[in-house]
Amino acid sequence: MNGRRRRPTPARRPPRPRRPPPYDRDEVLARWSGCAYCDGPADELDHVLPLARGGRDTADNVVAACRTCNAAKYTHTLACWALTERSTAPCACDS
């Protein structure tokens, strides 16, 4: 052995999980005839389970929403938002 030390071989990383196919904004808006929450005209997309709460950016987590509903829902879960939408009680998902 020439007095040289062999370099250790680097550990192999596990393969990354495949990304889900992307969704098209126009397809999502066309799939819903209006806002998923109030049936008004939809002009935005909303993540049903918000990204801030661990939701994924996939087609099955995105719905069409009007600006008012999307802003009111913000980062709340759908269940929490629906329960506190017309009440003054604090949102349970913020605790």
Image: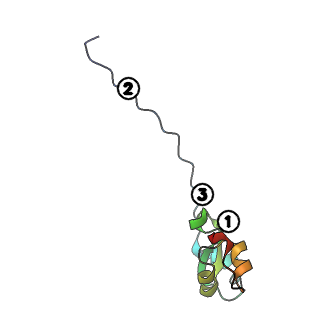
Q: Compared with residue 35, is residue 47 higher up or lower down, i.e. above or below?
A: above
Asked where in the image residue 62 lies, by quadrant, the reply is: bottom right
The residue that mark 1 highlights is 60
Which quarter of the rendering shows the N terminus? top left
Q: Nearer the viewer, residue 89 or 33?
A: 89
Relative side of 7 to 12, left or right: left
Q: Quadrant of residue 26?
A: bottom right
Mark 3 and mark 1 in contact? Answer it, CB < 8 Å: no
Q: Residue at x 30, y 19 (%)?
A: 5
Earlier sequence position, callout 3 versus callout 2 = 2
Q: CA distance from mark 3 to mark 1?
A: 10 Å
**Residue drawn at the location 45% of the way across and 33% of the way down:** 11
Using the numbered discs, state the Cα–Cα distance from disc 3 to disc 2 in whole angstroms.
35 Å
Q: Nearer the viewer, residue 44 or 28?
A: 44
Badge count: 3
Which residue corresponds to mark 3? 20
What residue is disc 2 on?
8
Image height of 52 relative to 40, above or below: above
Q: In the rendered view, would you say 30 is above or below 58?
A: below
Mark 3, Cα crowd under 10 Å, few <14 / some 14-19 / many 20+, is few
Mark 1 vs mark 2, CA separation in Å: 44 Å
